[in-house]
Amino acid sequence: MKTLQQRLLTTLIAGALATSAVAAPDGKVKIGVLADMGGTYADLCGPGCVTATQMAIEDFGGQVLGSPIELVTADSQLKPDVASAIARQWVESDNVDTIGGLVSSAVTGAVTQVTNTSKNITLITGSASNSFTTKACSPYIAHWTYNVVALANGTVKSLVKSGKKKWFFITADYAFGHALENVSTGVIKENGGEVVGSVRAPLGTTDFSSYVLQAQSSGADVVALANAGNDTVNALNAAAEFGLTQSMDVAGLLVFTPNAQAMDPATAAGMRLTTGFYWDMDEKTRAWSKRFEERHGAIPSMAHAGAYSATLHYLNAVKAAGTDEPDAVMKQMKATKPEDFFARNAQLRADGRMVHDMLLVEIKPAAERKNKNDIYKIIEVIPADEAYNPMIAECNFSS
Amino acid sequence: MNKKLLLILLPLALLAPLVLYPVFLAKVLCFALFACAFNLLLGFAGLLSFGHAAFLGTGGYVTGWLMINSGLTPELAIIAGTIAGGLLGAVYGALAVKREGIYFAMVTLALAQLTFFLYVQAPFTHGEDGMQGIPRGALFGLIDLSDNMVMYYFVLAIFCFGFWLINRTVHSPFGQVLKAIRENESRAISLGYDVNRYKWLAFVISAALASLAGATKSLVFELASLTDVHWHMSGEVILMTLVGGVGTLFGPLVGAGFVVTMQNYLSGGELGNYIHIIMGAVFVICVLSFRSGIVGQLAKFKRDNF
Amino acid sequence: MASLFDINLFALFGQLLIGLINGSFYALLSLGLAIIFGLLKIINFAQGAMYMLGAFAALLGMQYLGINYWFALILVPLAVGLVGILMERFLIRRIANEDHLYSLLLTFGLALMLQGIFTHLFGSSGLSYPIPDALKGGTKLPFMYLPNYRAWIILVSVVVCIGTWWMIEKTKLGAYLRAGTENPQLLQAFGINVPLIVTLTFGFGVALAGLAGVMAAPVYSVSPDMGSNILIVVFAIVVIGGMGSIGGAILTGLGMGVIEGLTKYFYPEASTTVIFLVMVIVLLFKPAGLFGKEA
């Protein structure tokens, strides 16, 4: 009996309330920042990404389309399921227009699954995988800051060309690490090098000793760390402890400024790496970084600077388009070139990839550092069109 | 008493999504079913499993994989996920029920860790990335589940089925024997009952229903991930059951509602970091002075005062 | 070809040695757990949290009080032991007469709280503690470069484990302890303060975890979840060794470290799981564990 009642009611209510899952533009812009607030990547794009987004909103004037811009934030805990559930609630129930921050490719993958369907723009500023503009591309993605291709085209190419031919990988065991290893392997082979082995370590590994040992017995010239955040720092520490740095080069393929600061200069000095931004590049970067440091307590990472740049570009597009309707906003974002202290020679391509000049830098030895923030020497500017992967036809959303 | 309670609860459950976010409610129901399944074992057979996450996760992965790859309709995929979890439960149960107390808990934990390892390694789960983009599909090929409201009522129907099944099991002769074993195992043996067989069957039913919860959850969130197989999840379901009331029918439902709500409201804001502190404190308080849980205490209060 | 073989053999020895280092931590932690369970019948799921507490105490002691590593090695176990004593006296004792599983749930809750508090205060990303100057550098072995600090870990662990085992099995104090678990009423009748012995034993078991925490601080990053990650492994070791068997816990701890090292060489992905496989097999064929007495 109870099941009959229930069925009747179910049909009635479901019929009366069936609404479309796609959010309608309401003229009020609400930005959600989903980042790692306390985990392995918290220093790269955690509270700092919130601060940077906040600064962009303030610099823009705090309101657009006649209403104040709202900001909500949440901790992804670096877990795809947590992030996916938050993103879903944001776009379906809380009227969030766009989601920014997004560090860890696993998290970003789960979030874009939701936002691509709901047609909400994502401003990816912390993740590295190139899949968001290739096999998982969408007209609603804008991938800012950097990606694995740019990293490999910078760091890996320059090392192979300098004669380091045999490579061993210590790879973070999830989407990002796999992508970085794959793309780097391609670059190594193209330039006449070879990969002699690789090992995969779970995200958040604290003891890298057994991986370092494997690397040591591989006979490689370079041990590449295809991981990020504290994983990179811990791996480098283990490499130093077990004497690996005396016989081989260690290359951190993805190093953010807070990690470079955390490394022992004695081991890290001379390491070359690719970054999308360095605070001490010129007057414009210094000016913004100083403001950021005053609020955040540390110099900005490239993800922080990217979060600012992406948010500002998004807000400018909303203003120019006169609506928060995602298709119109994205069209506007792709039509105008982003230009600020971060985005140099930049363009948001039709596939959602934001290309801009990248920097190849070298970590300074302790003796050359003027203060604790003075960590990189800029070796080379990699032009935007050389740094990034070419657009593939399936992802051309220009029409 | 239970009938009256149902008459109040059911309309509430039916009307709730008008006020609250349906995906949140569906999540509560999935965990409530999971906790009810767990409670069948702990509350009615006296067996503390520390590895029930293995079944939640298995249901999710199997159903998710079938939805992505096979083109089955959701109800068939869920049934398949439930059966897969039940089979796993049959194997694990056969190994575990030979042991008692802490050893039973440890065997289930170890088996769940082996399962976790398999899922980390198996390519089809996509490891840390999780199995993403599971389509919700169309129920019986007719009713599109992509609408959250429709999905919620589907989940509610599944929950009601699971709850009904547990209720029937507990009140059946089989359930009476389980309780006899819980109270005094040697007496049950001397009465001629094949105790291990009863425990095993309870384990299988519990595992299958836990998988049903996991299967449903993977459709609600369109995602299955390692979180559901991790041993923390096995701990969480103990907490839910303990808070709500071990060995009561409605306890796990209340406990799951309590824990999920707390997680949901704490995780968003500034209080996110407090979640473990609060959950730990709840655990401690429950064990020290509240062992019969919310529902148990209410029942006692009612007995004493009415 | 010969050189290829050599390299592989060297790598194997290297992994075994690293396994032995990890095993030293396992032995210290499982020893504490085995004492607490064997003598008191308390299932202490907070042992991992106490290990974490030890590492943080060393780190904070250095940052705020200027306590160096060597003093921390003495002071931190005492401090952590005191926390354990308070825990036993005010919380665990209240459920002393309930099912053992309730002590598991209670300490699980305490562990969650501690982990939550430290995550709240320090984030979950992990902090680093410097290796003391005297133990920096390393020794070149034929098959690998052994950092001095890692050798130190093995040394301390073995000394502490043997000392503890000797104290419990061979001294008069140990005899009281063992008698107290067999028949507390009788021992009480002889005029010995049994509740005090219980409290102190718990404190000692927990202090061992605190010591392991100090030892771990310079090599593993100090983070709030370092305890929960190692806890279930250590639990498995205690179960494999036979719950309550002191010698069993020590030997199994070292042995499992070595087995992990072997697995890292042959099938690295399975290294975190192999212990559970062993545990299932042991429990199926020898329910009381390798060194446990059948009840």
Image: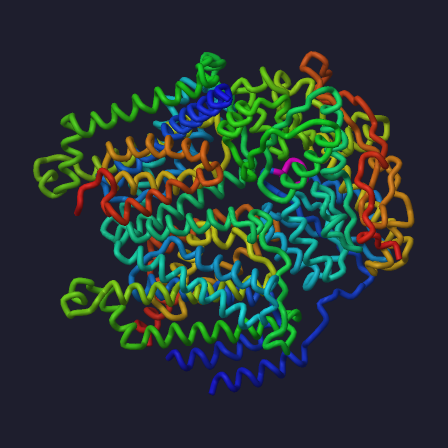
Q: Is residue A162 left or right of residue C85?
A: right
Does the magenta run of residues contain B258? no
Q: Residue at x 8, y 39 (%)?
A: C189
Q: How many marks?
A: 0
Q: Position of residue A39 (x, y in %)?
A: 58, 40
- The residue drawn where x is 65% and y is 74% is B144
Left or right, C22 with respect to A321, comes to left
The answer to which of A233 and B67 lies nearer the viewer is B67
Res. A70 visible in picture: no
Q: Is residue C109 visible?
A: yes
Image location of residue A48, percent across then percent down? 69, 39
Residue A44 lies within the magenta run: yes
Q: Which residues are magenta?
A: A41-46
Relative depth, front residue between B54 and C168: B54
Within the image, what quadrant is residue A329 found in? bottom right
Task: Decide whether the magenta segment is chiefly helix, strand or loop.
Answer: helix
